């Protein structure tokens, strides 16, 4: 029995199917023992990608994702991804290697105060100093990750708890010499080694606790139903929290349909209602919120995405439901707030109110007219050639949307190109859209796409990259090739950090720091073992997309290097 085996047994019991990692001697037993128990170990090229991949698994399945990273730099390299998971409220477990228990603070390799590093950014952080305590520590962390407001958790696993007792005893062998002090030191070292493993063979592996999300009270649902029945122009805004119960998304769709309220979807909730649902609105959200007399914020905070609450009319009643009491009252206190799982709340609300029928048909028609008009504007702009003869990004996104398989997952990682795509490329159903969330992190793409394809092996995975963001995780093409993960990546290559340049050049008159080259990303992909395709002629778009899809179906990862021309589509849209 060793600590690596105990950890692997806990992960298996909690339904963990994938363990993402970048190898290191501090954590090797965890990887080996997880593999023995049928957990697929997937090694990536950067520790942040391991956490992003685990995050994607958590979002798409509801089961906490798990990453194991080595001590010191291995842990520090995860911090941006950990913070992104915290702000996106994703349940992710990070198992961090650490120096031996007796060597902490003594100048050992890669030894830093890792708990102090992680504690501000996770729900739960713990270290362990005896092998028998590892199963309980890992189980406690997994329970914390998924309970209440989900989030990342960290467990530090010292290296001398993970290897076999006989080997650890050798490490702590006669080091003190033959004098009295030396003999005393050797006695202490032998005692310490025995203590590390005492009780390990009989250490219990906890069973997962029955999980229940925070539930609304009956009187809260009834009060919300009363507000909804009185509304003439209600609007529902749904955020990522509504899909935390991944196994119940179909029930949630039925509930939203029954409620009959025009709905705007954000972050991971995108795609929940499919492509052509009559209640889903995609454009002019600000105008709708200004005209509404009741706004329901379900799992969505009044942060910068709602202009800190100012997007909502002061005359409107605000009904908020959120697992987080802090997010519920952020920037604007709701007229009626409920601390509960928003998806479960909407299902209960639909049961209480019954089908809406045609109650708000006029209001829905008004919003639909705006949506249709905006779609026509975008279509007209997509038809315009760029001045330099390269691809119009709107036209490229329209063609991707046209050919994309119904069983697809969209992963978006970038600025200007990705924001353009969000207006046009439509996820086909629930849990088919992955974006960073409120942190706006660049670099999520390589890991997100990896996790998505492993969870949905038969689905097309479309990774839409800006040319700036692509460089953060471009090396994961190597991971895709080695592990047989056929992702279709599209790099919108406009040779710049265009989202920043749009404002910086106009306001400050200087493009410093925003200019990139038309890098040959397709050749980079070939070097990593994928198929690289250059797309620099608009006429070639259907052919290149078809070739990419065919290669992915054959099991090969693909990167399309799409050379974009200039447009003014998103001028003036920077968020700060």
Image (spheres, rainbow, N blue to C red):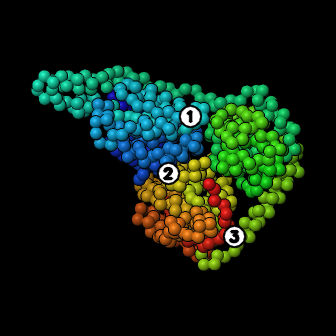
For label 1, the SS is: helix
Q: Is residue 41 visible?
A: no
Q: What is the distance, in whole Å, between disc 2 and disc 3 at their CAs?
A: 30 Å
Q: Which residue is pictured at 76% across the width and 53% down the height?
A: 286
Q: Which circle's residue, 2 or 3, is located before the other in the chain?
A: 3
Q: Position of residue 441 (x, y in %)?
A: 54, 52
Q: Is residue 2 above or below residue 539?
A: above
Q: Residues within 10 Å of mark 3 (few under 14, many from 20)?
A: many
Q: Is residue 30 above or below residue 435?
A: above
Q: Decide if residue 566 is on the left or right side of residue 179.
A: right
Q: Decide if residue 421 is on the left or right side of residue 72.
A: right
Q: Position of residue 223 (x, y in %)?
A: 80, 31
Residue 382 shows which numbered tag?
3
For label 3, the SS is: helix
Q: Which residue is mark 1?
A: 146
Q: Nearer the viewer, residue 143 or 120?
A: 120
Q: Which residue is mark 2?
A: 447
What is the tally of numbered marks visible in this picture?
A: 3
Q: Residues within 10 Å of mark 1 (few under 14, many from 20)?
A: many
Q: Which circle's residue, 3 or 1, is located before the other in the chain?
A: 1
Quadrant where the C terminus is found in the figure: bottom right
Q: Decide if residue 183 is on the left or right side of residue 277.
A: left
Q: Which circle's residue, 1 or 2, is located before the other in the chain?
A: 1
Q: Nearer the viewer, residue 484 or 464?
A: 464
Q: Quadrant of residue 528?
A: bottom left
Identity of the residue furthest to the left in this view: 178
Q: What is the distance, in whole Å, between disc 1 and disc 2 at their CAs?
A: 21 Å
């Amino acid at each position: 029995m060793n600590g690596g085996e105990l950890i692997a047994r806990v992960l298996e019991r909690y339904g963990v199917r994938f363990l993402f990692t970048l190898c290191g001697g501090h954590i090797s037993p965890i990887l080996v023992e997880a593999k023995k128990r049928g957990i697929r170990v997937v090694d990536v090229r950067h520790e942040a990608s391991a956490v992003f991949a685990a995050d994607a698994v958590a979002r798409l399945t509801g089961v906490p994702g798990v990453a194991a990273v080595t001590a010191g730099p291995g842990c520090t390299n995860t911090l941006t991804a950990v913070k992104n998971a915290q702000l996106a409220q994703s349940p992710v477990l990070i198992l961090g290697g650490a120096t031996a228990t007796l060597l902490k603070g003594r100048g050992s390799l890669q030894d830093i105060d890792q708990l102090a590093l992680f504690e501000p950014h996770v729900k739960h952080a713990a270290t362990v100093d005896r092998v028998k305590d590892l199963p309980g520590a890992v189980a406690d962390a997994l329970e914390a990750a998924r309970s209440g407001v989900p989030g990342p958790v960290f467990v530090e696993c010292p290296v001398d708890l993970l290897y076999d007792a006989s080997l650890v005893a050798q490490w702590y062998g006669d080091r003190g010499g033959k004098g009295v002090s030396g003999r005393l030191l050797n006695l202490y070292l032998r005692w310490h080694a025995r203590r590390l493993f005492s009780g390990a063979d009989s250490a219990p592996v906890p069973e997962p606790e029955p999980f229940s999300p925070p539930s609304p009270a009956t009187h809260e649902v009834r009060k919300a139903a009363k507000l909804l029945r009185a509304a003439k122009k209600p609007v529902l805004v749904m955020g990522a929290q509504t899909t935390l119960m991944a196994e119940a998304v179909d029930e949630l769709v039925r509930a939203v349909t029954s409620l009959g309220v025009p709905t705007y979807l954000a972050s991971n909730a995108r795609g929940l209602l499919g492509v052509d649902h009559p209640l889903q609105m995609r454009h002019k959200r600000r105008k709708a919120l200004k005209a509404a007399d009741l706004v329901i914020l379900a799992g969505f905070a009044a942060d910068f995405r709602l202009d800190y609450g100012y997007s909502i009319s002061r005359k409107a009643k605000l009904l908020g439901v959120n697992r987080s009491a802090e997010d519920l009252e952020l920037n604007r206190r709701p007229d009626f707030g409920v601390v509960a799982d928003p998806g479960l709340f909407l299902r209960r609300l639909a049961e209480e109110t019954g089908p809406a029928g045609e109650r708000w048909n006029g209001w829905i028609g008004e919003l639909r007219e705006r949506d249709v008009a905006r779609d026509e504007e975008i279509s007209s702009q997509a038809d315009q050639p760029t001045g330099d003869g390269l691809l119009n990004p709107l036209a490229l996104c329209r063609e991707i949307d046209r050919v994309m398989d119904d069983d697809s997952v969209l992963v978006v990682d970038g600025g200007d190109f990705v924001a353009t795509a969000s207006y046009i490329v439509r996820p086909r159903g629930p849990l088919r859209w992955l974006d960073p969330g409120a942190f706006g992190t660049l670099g999520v793409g390589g890991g997100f796409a990896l996790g998505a394809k492993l969870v949905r092996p038969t689905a097309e995975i479309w990774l839409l990259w800006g040319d700036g963001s692509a460089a953060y995780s471009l090396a994961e093409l190597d991971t895709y090739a080695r592990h047989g993960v056929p992702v279709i990546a599209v790099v919108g290559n406009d040779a710049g950090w265009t989202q920043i340049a749009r404002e910086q050049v106009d306001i400050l008159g200087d493009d410093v720091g925003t200019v990139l080259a038309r890098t040959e990303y397709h050749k980079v992909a070939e070097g990593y073992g994928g198929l690289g395709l250059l797309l620099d002629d608009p006429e070639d778009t259907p052919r290149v997309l078809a070739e990419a899809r065919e290669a992915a179906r054959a099991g090969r990862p693909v990167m399309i290097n799409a050379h974009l021309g200039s447009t003014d589509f998103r001028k003036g849209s920077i968020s700060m």
